[in-house]
Structures are given as C-alpha cells and as structure tokens.
Image (tube, grey):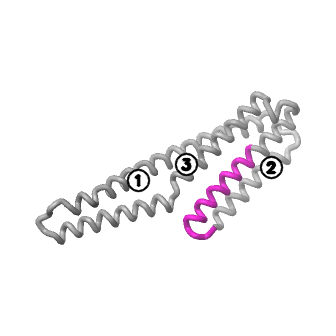
Amino acid sequence: MCKFKNQKERTEERRKEYLRRAKATKEEREEYMQDVVKRIDNYNRRADNCRKWHTWLKTIDIALSASIPVLAVIPFRCESIQRLTIAIVGAVVAILTTLLELHKFRENRMNYRMAANKLARQRHRYLTRTTPYHDKDDEAAFKHFVENAENIINEEHSSWEGCIGSSSGTK
C-alpha cells in the first residue's frame, strides 16, 4: 500500500507545483500539455492491453468450459485418464476465472478508457477555449485546465486503487 500512497503524493505534489505558479510560462504550458497527451496515450495503451488480456483469457475459459461435457461423453481407453483430463480442464477453468476476477481486466479497461476520453475532452475544450475556458484569460484558463486534468488523473488513480483493494479483499 505504501507504493500507492507515494504515487498519490507525487501526483499531488506535481499538481500543486503547477498551481503554485501564478504565471506559467509558455514552455511550462506546452510541457504540461505534452504530459497530458502522453497520459492519454498511456491510458489508451493500458485499455487496449486490458482488452486483449480479457478477450484471450475469457475465450480460453469459454472454450475449456464447453469442452468438459464433451470430454465426459467421449469414450477413453482408460477411465482414470478421462477423469484426470476432466479434472485438469476443470482446474484450468477455475484458475482462468479467478485470474479474470482478480485482475479485473474489463473494469480497468473501462476506467482507463474513460480517463483517456475525459482528459482528451478537457484538452480539446482548453485548446478551443470552449466552456468552461471561454471566458477566462490564458493564466486562469490554464490553471483551471490543470485542476480539471489533475482531478481526472486522481479520480482514475483512486478508481484503480479501489479495484486493486477490492480484488485483494482490503478495500
């Protein structure tokens, strides 16, 4: 749990650092925007990775689950080999199901995708100066953008911690 707290503290320190600067320079703004773009790409990459893992594990789980009744009716030369095969396939299905539940690939994918979409939407609104940034000067708009972006990042991080905490039974 210590690692998560340190990550949260680093994120909060970074957020405070940007907000402390009453007048962020153009370079600092560009650097922060590049950081946001990297985060969006990172969230999208993580979402794709979770989707791939979930799809593969679930496909194998379904295929093996469906094979158990077939294995039960197929005549084997030795009945003990048949029982052993069915038991092994059943154990693998149980392991796959547990892995899917433990790692929560589907939930994490949705959280990563939502965070990427929210960040991209805020970035687009800031760059086009649409609501809520339309009536603010550059400094106030940037400060508001940083607050919104960091809130999204912290929300995703808290959501991820919640998934990890609930899967290990220590929420």
Residue at horizontal 65 percent and vertical 67 percent from the top: 2
Residue at horizontal 55 percent and vertical 68 percent from the top: 168
Dot 2 amino acid type: Glu
Rendered position, 126 above or below 83? above
- Residue 151's tag is none
**First in sequence: mark 3 vs mark 1:** 1
- Residue 109's tag is 3
Dot 3 amino acid type: Arg
Residue 5 drawn at (x, y percent): 69, 63
Q: Is residue 106 left or right of residue 122?
A: left
Mark closer to the observer (2, 1): 1
Neighbours of disc 1 within 10 Å: few (<14), some (14-19), many (20+): some
**First in sequence: mark 2 vs mark 1:** 2
Can you tell which quarter of the image residue 113 is in? top right
Residue at horizontal 28 percent and vertical 68 percent from the top: 87
Provide the major secondary structure of the magenta segment: helix
**First in sequence: mark 2 vs mark 3:** 2
Rendered position, 9 above or below 49? below
Q: Which residue is mark 2?
A: 17
Whether residue 127 is in magenta: the answer is no
Say which element carries label 2.
Answer: helix
Say which element carries label 3.
Answer: helix
Mark closer to the observer (2, 3): 3
Residues rendered magenta in the picture: 149-171
Can you tell which quarter of the image residue 28 is in? top right
Q: CA distance from mark 2 to mark 3?
A: 30 Å
Q: Is residue 37 left or right of residue 85?
A: right
Residue 79 drawn at (x, y percent): 16, 70
Residue 22 drawn at (x, y percent): 88, 42
- Residue 57's tag is 1
Rendered position, 62 above or below 85? above
Q: Is residue 49 left or right of residue 136?
A: left
